[in-house]
Image (cartoon, rainbow, N blue to C red):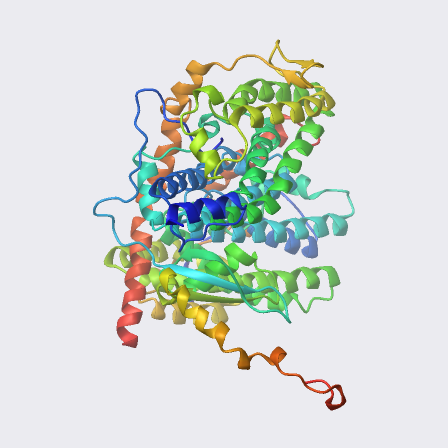
């Protein structure tokens, strides 16, 4: 496979992933793009930038190639909050509260669309 | 700027005698061509991946404008010269670009300062030319104006980051301003007050100063260049001159 | 189900593993290395092609080449982003590249000596990359697969423009055709080497297949590439530099000669013709740009300080 560069006989595979004393680089930003009117923003990738203005400029260059009419949001990656995987159990409760779902109510046809 | 020491074109016959409209088109085309060539040298050498992509995009924009202007110049001239005839087969003395754009990239600060000076100038230029009676030129100017706005945002925001960043970036930025200042009178000649006011404001925001040195050099618009253009053209034109008349 | 069983069930089901899922440490480490090396390959790959931007023979070709190399930078960026979802930092990955601890596709250790190399790289190198990349869109790791989908969309123009460049040369003057043949002579075997060692010599293949990181074997990919490329060379009127290359009707595939495995391993170990230059170029750009990155960070910190 092209990118799984093989380990030569006599070499050990380098599994090191971080570098000691590495300087703090530019922080990471998540990029959201709304490609055209009528649809929502979609997460499209990430990039590194020192500040929000650079992040926006970079996102425009990298992810939209400066297409017109496209809306770009950037958010510091540290500002994305998510449930921990184990807390997926928290979602189960919502499924039990069936009275919230419109489909469980029978509305007579004569009343019209609801 | 009134007490400038101006070193300009020597006396003598110009190499090329062109009609003013053609001369204008080629001047702006050459500006963008030479700068595109310089920015292309940054590809794979930029300080960060995102910057590499941005500089490459800016280079492509300048190249696109150059190509449109060369093509239109060919149509206007009516001698069937193509964009490649203009870019690859004219000599140094026939190129009409500003001296500023042929200056080497230097470090990133020098590239940014060169870009800021040029973007402020082109910002005014395209606004002017968008009202041209030449409809094709007006169309090119309208598109180029939008692109220059992007470039301007990039270059001016970097000028501020570098001027007001670290001691080293401040030192390099000031050095770049000092080194390139002598090419700005030629650049700003059509809009001296406009250009100077905008630049003074930007320099102040970046914590930088315009040098007091009155020395200015010009001559690019008459085909009298610095020693840099010869080398740039030698590289750019080599393939076409080595394999004349072939299609690629 | 144990987490391990749950993980393998997702993989077997052709579903995607996402960043917050449990995954075996070996899976994660293999992916970090592979995605990072893929990203490094895109970035280093900018150099051999970037070499001809200032010398492109026409403005049209210059524009195409600039756009192609910018695409590669963008691809590197998407891939580093995918790698970072696995808990590593891009700067660290680059440092590992600079130190020679991470590798990149060996093909980029060969020099681009003529304009025809631009066409040949597009045709052969991007052609080989595409056979690999389509497979990777089906990789089990979500962020990597998604990056590959985006990359594949942009990649198809690269191969076409390379081949079209060669058509022009082969239909041009004798000097141009000779230039194209010379380029093919130099790039053919390195392109075959892109697919790695024979499967029988490949240590980690089985595990990568089980994890659906690798979807097709090295030998199968290489065969696919040869079969696809032979008629393309014939159309150009160029001769592939392999006297043993011939169609085998029983197999339904082309037979081809043996790769020079000594050269292969020599280049993998870092002694390719341009290996040193590629890393020096990359490292120098990084070192010389340090003050720029620091200035931007310092300025941002000042802004944050003022706002506070």
Residue displayed at 72% across by 87% down: A108
| Residue toward you, C64 or B205 | C64
Q: Position of residue C78 (x, y in %)?
A: 48, 49
Q: In front here: C305 or B169? A: C305
Outermost residue toward the left in this view: A21
Q: How many marks?
A: 0
Percent across and percent down for residue B247 are 71, 31
Left or right of residue C271, residue C48 in this image: right
Across and down, in percent, residue A34 comes to 57, 66
User: Quarter of the image holding residue C116?
Assistant: top right
User: Left or right: where does residue B54 sit relative to residue C238?
Assistant: left
Of residues C23 and C91, the one nearer the viewer is C23
Q: Quadrant of the C terminus of chain A?
A: bottom right
Image location of residue B55, percent across then percent down: 48, 51
Name the residue at 35% across, 70% down.
Answer: B205
Q: Is residue A100 above or below residue C125?
A: below
Q: Is residue B121 above or below residue C169?
A: below
The answer, for residue A30, to whether it is visible in the render is yes
Residue at the far top: name it. C243
Q: Which residue occupies the extreme bottom position in the image?
A: A111
**Residue closest to the eye, B80 or C146:** C146
Taking the image as shown, residue C251 lies to the left or right of residue C74, namely right
The reply to whether residue B10 is in sight is no
Residue at 61% of width from left, 26% of height from top? C225
């Amino acid at each position: 496979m092209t990118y799984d560069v093989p380990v030569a006989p006599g070499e050990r595979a380098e599994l090191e992933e971080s570098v000691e004393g590495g300087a703090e680089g530019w922080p990471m930003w998540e990029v959201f793009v709304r490609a055209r009117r009528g649809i929502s923003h979609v997460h499209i990738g990430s990039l590194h930038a020192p500040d929000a203005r650079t992040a926006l400029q970079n996102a425009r260059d990298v992810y939209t190639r400066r297409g017109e009419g496209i809306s770009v949001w950037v958010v510091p990656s540290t500002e994305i909050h998510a449930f921990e995987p184990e807390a997926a159990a928290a979602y189960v409760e919502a499924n039990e509260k069936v009275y919230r779902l419109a489909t469980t109510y029978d509305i007579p046809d004569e009343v019209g669309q609801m | 700027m009134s007490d400038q020491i101006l070193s300009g074109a020597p006396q003598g016959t110009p190499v090329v005698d062109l009609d003013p409209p053609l001369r204008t088109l080629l001047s702006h085309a050459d500006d963008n061509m030479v700068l595109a060539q310089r920015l292309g040298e940054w590809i794979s050498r930029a300080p960060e991946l995102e910057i590499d992509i941005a500089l490459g995009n800016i280079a492509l924009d300048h190249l696109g404008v150059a190509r449109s202007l060369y093509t239109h110049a060919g149509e206007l001239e009516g001698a069937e010269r193509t964009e490649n005839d203009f870019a690859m087969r004219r000599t140094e003395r026939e190129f009409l670009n500003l001296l500023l754009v042929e200056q080497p990239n230097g470090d990133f600060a020098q590239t940014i300062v060169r870009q800021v000076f040029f973007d402020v100038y082109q910002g005014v230029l395209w606004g002017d030319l968008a009202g041209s009676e030449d409809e094709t030129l007006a169309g090119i100017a309208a598109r180029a104006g939008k692109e220059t706005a992007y470039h301007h945002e990039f270059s001016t925001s970097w000028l501020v980051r570098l001027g007001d960043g670290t001691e080293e970036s401040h030192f390099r930025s000031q050095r770049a301003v000092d080194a390139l200042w002598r090419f700005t009178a030629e650049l700003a000649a059509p809009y001296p007050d406009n250009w100077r006011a905008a630049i003074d404001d930007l320099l102040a925001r970046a914590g930088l100063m315009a040098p007091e040195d009155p020395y200015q050099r010009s001559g690019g618009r008459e085909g009298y260049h610095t020693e840099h253009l010869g080398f740039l053209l030698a590289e750019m034109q080599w393939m076409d001159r080595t394999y004349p008349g072939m299609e690629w | 189900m144990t987490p391990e069983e749950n993980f393998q069930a997702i993989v077997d089901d052709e579903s995607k593993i996402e960043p917050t899922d449990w995954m075996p440490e070996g899976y994660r480490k293999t992916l970090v290395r592979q995605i990072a090396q893929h990203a490094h390959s895109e970035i280093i790959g900018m150099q051999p092609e970037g070499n001809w931007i200032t010398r492109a023979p026409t403005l049209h070709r210059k524009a195409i080449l600039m756009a192609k190399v910018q695409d590669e930078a963008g691809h590197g960026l998407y891939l580093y982003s995918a790698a970072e979802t696995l808990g590593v930092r891009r700067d660290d990955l680059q440092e590992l590249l600079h130190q020679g601890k991470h590798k990149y596709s060996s093909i980029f250790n060969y020099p681009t000596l003529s304009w025809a190399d631009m066409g040949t790289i597009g045709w052969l190198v991007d052609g080989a990359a595409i056979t690999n990349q389509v497979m990777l869109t089906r990789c089990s790791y979500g962020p990597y697969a998604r990056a590959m989908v985006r990359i594949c969309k942009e990649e198809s123009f690269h191969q076409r423009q390379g081949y079209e460049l060669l058509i022009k040369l082969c239909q041009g003057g004798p000097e141009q055709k000779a230039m194209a043949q010379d380029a093919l002579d130099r790039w053919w075997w390195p392109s075959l080497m892109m697919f790695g060692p024979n499967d029988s010599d490949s240590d980690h293949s089985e595990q990568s297949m089980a994890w659906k990181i690798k979807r097709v074997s090295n030998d199968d990919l290489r065969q696919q590439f040869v079969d696809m490329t032979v008629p393309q060379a014939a159309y150009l009127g160029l001769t592939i530099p392999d006297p043993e290359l011939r169609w085998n009707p029983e197999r339904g595939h082309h037979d081809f000669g043996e790769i020079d495995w000594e050269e292969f391993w020599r280049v993998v170990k870092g002694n390719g013709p341009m290996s040193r230059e590629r890393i020096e170029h990359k490292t120098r750009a990084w070192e010389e740009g340090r003050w720029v990155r620091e200035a931007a960070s310092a300025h941002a910190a000042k802004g944050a300080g003022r706002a506070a």
